[in-house]
Amino acid sequence: MFRKLPGDEARNLVSTTPDTAVVFRPAVVKTPAILTILTWAWRMISSLVRTTWRHPIAAFLTTAPIVLTALYGWRVALLLLAPPLTGLIAWALLDRPTFARHVGYRLLAWWRLIWVYRRHWQPTMIVSGLGRHLRGRDYLPKLGKITCTSWADQVTARMLNGQAVKDWSDRTDHLAHGFGATTCRVAVLKSGRVLLTFPRHDPLAVPLPALAIPAAPTLGPVEIGKREDGTPWLLKILGTHILISGATGAGKGSIIWSVIRALLPALAAGLVQVWALDPKLMELSYGKPLFGGHYAATPEACADLLDAAVTLMQERAARLAGVQRTHTPTEQDPFVLVVVDEVAFLTAYQQDRDLKRRISAALATLTTQGRAVGVGVMAALQDPRKEVMNIRNLFPDKIALRLDESEQVDMVLGDGARDRGALADQISSTPELGAGVGYVRLETSPDPVRVRAAFVSDADIHAMVATFTVGGAA
Ligand SMILES: Nc1ncnc2c1ncn2[C@@H]1O[C@H](COP(=O)(O)OP(=O)(O)OP(=O)(O)O)[C@@H](O)[C@H]1O
């Protein structure tokens, strides 16, 4: 008995009857040569058109000299090309930023496409497991558009059908090293497409000096540092609570002080009050005159100050109920920002059980009910574990500075943050390189953004106190 089987299934066949004759006739389809030639020609032409469309300047600069030399000889080619080239060089010398934006980064993107991404795409995809090599054929995600910014390459890739973004975010290390970068971040562009960001250098490697105090009172979002893309880092203060988590020396103080600095005119105008809890007796004691008597250092005083904040909040809520849905800060009714340095000293590490209970209850009440009535909490913390800070989820905005362990990143920023590139555990412990550097998740996007807070030195704080006192607000 003869049975015809498709060639591919030969290896799966198990014959249980030894006397049965089985004949394999692999199906061979001969492709006419013309079809193969047409396919290759089509691929070549479409790739040329695509490259010219995406990189017109690079296409012009590479083909024009060849074409002109072939047509008219090198002397005429040189004569024709000299004016546009001189124009480009003059532009680059006279107005670097616009040249970089319109020409420089586009040329760089073309060069990086050819030299880095196209060259290393196949091996990196196969070795990382994002592509497959099956029966002599490569199944690879498609390399898309590349754009260069001042600090990073942004590469679009079309995922293979059936792939998940997690497959990519789990392999950021493979991708980074495969393309010669130190890190890689993965974001979703649209269904089936991911955007990979490969930093070429670190724009946050140099410490930022304290920013200028705003000219007019502002209640936020206040500028407290720089984002990785060079834009200002603005932090929302009104209508939220902020948790800053970072190991010792990570620069939590620089965030607290940058916020107070940006609020200084509003503080002087009486629109804001900062109530400071300083159980370590170090960070906030410098600026005591700024807090107008709302300063506490011992656990008992901290508990009293928090209870006073709760009373104020409840009195305000009772007054505003049915009149106003959100609180607008005024001189009579200022916004109150309760700043707590190392909150775990007052909660998890507090020996006195009664005090611990009082403080925890007050913090929980403020963080659950304070937003609408103009009472905000900004707390700093070294260890973000739940045992240490069981109310961390009551803080809508969280900032992860340098952390000791990789698991702590998701505890602070939420599930999947580290996979998406928030490598807070890899921030340098050298203060010049890493202090004040961290990751935030903005409300508008699940992708973490790398930031650096400006450093407010002791001298800056003294100057702030002097300005504030001279201004007559103290
Ligand atoms: N934004 C910054 N830019 C540059 N250097 C900084 C920055 N913030 C802090 N530093 C440097 O790092 C040192 C430690 O900072 P800081 O005391 O604020 O850290 P911390 O997280 O509050 O630490 P701890 O929890 O031990 O108090 C500072 O003395 C300063 O030299």
Image (tube, rainbow, N blue to C red):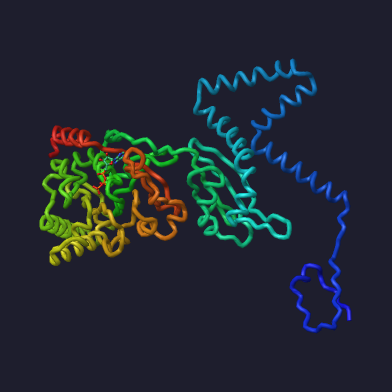
473 or 21: nearer the eye?
A: 21
Left or right position of 94 against 255: right
191 or 257: nearer the eye?
A: 257
120 or 451: nearer the eye?
A: 120
Residue 208 visible in image: yes
* Image location (x, y in percent) of residue 77: 73, 19
Residue 223 visible in image: no
Left or right position of 43 against 418: right
The quarter of the rendered structure image containing the C terminus is top left
- The residue sitting at 25% across, 53% down in the picture is 379
* Image location (x, y in percent) of residue 172: 51, 52
Extreme residue in the front direction:
18
- The residue sitting at 38% across, 59% down in the picture is 407
Total tally of numbered discs in the picture: 0
Q: Quadrant of ligand 1?
A: top left
* Image location (x, y in percent) of residue 136: 73, 57
416 or 102: nearer the eye?
A: 416
The quarter of the rendered structure image containing the N terminus is bottom right
Q: Quadrant of residue 84?
A: top right
Q: Quadrant of residue 120?
A: top right
Please determine whether, in this image, residue 3 is positioned above or below residue 427.
below
Please determine whether, in this image, residue 456 is positioned above or below residue 422.
above
- The residue sitting at 37% across, 39% down in the picture is 226
* Image location (x, y in percent) of residue 110: 62, 36
